[in-house]
Image (tube, rainbow, N blue to C red):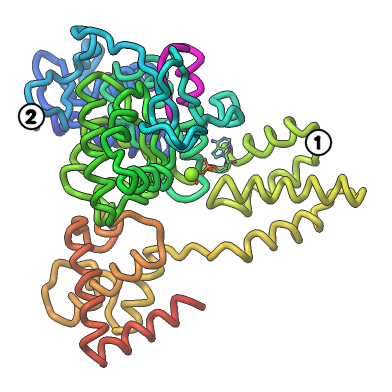
Amino acid sequence: MVKTAQSVWENCLLFIKDNIQDQAYKTWFEPIRAVELTDNALYIQVPSKFFYEWLEEHYVKLLKVALTKELGNSAKLLYKIKMENTYGNKQPFTEQLPSAHRAPVKPQEVDFPLQNKNPELKNPFVIPGIRNLKIDSQLNANYSFDNFFEGDSNRLARSAGLAVANKPGGTSFNPLLIFGGVGLGKTHLVHAIGIDIKDKYPDKTVLYISAEIFTQQYIDSVKRNTRNDFIHFYQLIDVLIIDDVQFLSGKTGTQDVFFHIFNHLHQNGKQVILTSDKAPVDMQDIEQRLLSRFKWGLSAELHQPDYETRISILNNILYRDGVEMPQEIIEYVARNIKSNVRELEGAIISLIAQSSFNHREVTLDLAKQVVEKFVKNIKREISIDYIQKVVSDYFQLDIDTLKSKTRKRHVVQARQLAMFFAKKFTKASLANIGSQIGDRDHATVLHACKTVDNLVTTDKQFRKFVDDINKKLSV
Ligand code: ADP
Ligand code: MG
């Protein structure tokens, strides 16, 4: 059989997949495309320079073994870097700061809008007469890189954060969007980036702000007729960090002003860092032009921490508080609290408190009681597989039929219901739901959710289906 770039690469992937963790495989190898095979050299296309550097740093040995198996000792691997979301005539991976060619922005005298202690000043954002007034960055010193533990679940986001901190505005990760569920470390990570930048570049103005406060400030500025000052203030920031941008959903005025600020900062080589509880494709009621801006840079997901990371987070908290705890207890907590770092912290701190205040020794029994309290409050995560099973049982279909391509009406309906409940009961993205339920795309899932919403209000029989299945899934 003639070897092609694709066939060679597919075989390499089979080997690689067997040798690394699933998450790492998905993050680093699934996005790669094999493009060419000439003279025993395989060209692979990677989405960014960062990607290439990462592969070289972490997986070069594995790649070499895989490729040598396929092409022999003279095998060569070459990279092509392709950035999808470049715009205009900007070259992919020009690493230089666009602002290098411009006159530097003159130091301005500014104050943080909400911190203005001088309400009678006409312009709330500028205090005249104070030179080089520093903006308070609003960063929390407790959230640094030093105490942000690395694991498979956060490696991409963390290292992209470090790259941005080394060269704010000077990488292709602009904006950098960190997304993921509650309590997975988004806020912590963006503070860490801000703190690191302040350390390395004391002259840069860094500002952390939640999207909620940003919105309030904007509304206030409209009321007080100082909208331009508001915009002007934000346009002076070198590194703007906005937390929880999903909060902007449906708020068109704030989105509009943010769009202008974003464009100005971006064009001037300033860094924008955002967090959100969803991936851009899953954000609702955010204007398309803003979403497309979010995609210019890098979106990095924080996943649920794996077991090793959970252990190291626990150990670190214990170390920080100077407490010792038997290994079996630590392992017990790490095994049983999986979904988020905040709960993990809560459980171990509660154990520490129990033992130090009540002078109780921490036994496995005590750990069980504490963990139970935490786990009970956590809605048990229902899997998409489980939902598909419940839905197909209900309609007496088998799962394969549900997942199949058939357009028979009753199957389509069952499939749409499975998608609807997957959206309702899991934290999976639309794209992820689609890929698990019959390999559909995110638009299909979105359509399914809307169809179900509509039918529930118009069709009594259908409503009963929904209620029945809902009950089965809720117990
Ligand atoms: P989010 O903003 O995603 O809801 P936070 O950043 O508020 O989550 O994190 C919740 C808690 O978990 C914080 O106390 C944070 O310090 C801690 N945390 C999250 N991820 C990590 C990590 N990788 N290492 C150490 N602490 C973490
Ligand atoms: Mg947060």
Residue 253: image location, x then y, percent: 24, 49
* Residue type marked 1: Val
As for residue 160 lying within the magenta part, the answer is no
Q: Determine the secondary structure under disc 2.
A: loop
Q: Which mark is residue 73?
A: none
In percent of the image, x 39 and y 40: which residue is there? 275
Taking the image as shown, residue 371 lies to the left or right of residue 423, namely right
Q: Which residue is mark 1?
A: 323
As for residue 206 lying within the magenta part, the answer is yes
With respect to residue 140, does 99 lie above or below? above
Q: Determine the secondary structure under disc 1.
A: loop
Q: Which mark is residue 2?
A: 2
Taking the image as shown, residue 214 lies to the left or right of residue 171, namely right
Q: Nearer the viewer, residue 277 or 251?
A: 251
Cβ(mark 2) to ligand 1 < 8 Å?
A: no
Q: Nearer the viewer, residue 66 or 146?
A: 146
Q: Which residues are magenta?
A: 193-207
* Residue type marked 2: Val
In percent of the image, x 51 and y 14: which residue is there? 199
Quarter of the image holding residue 421? bottom left
In percent of the image, x 42 and y 40: which residue is there? 243
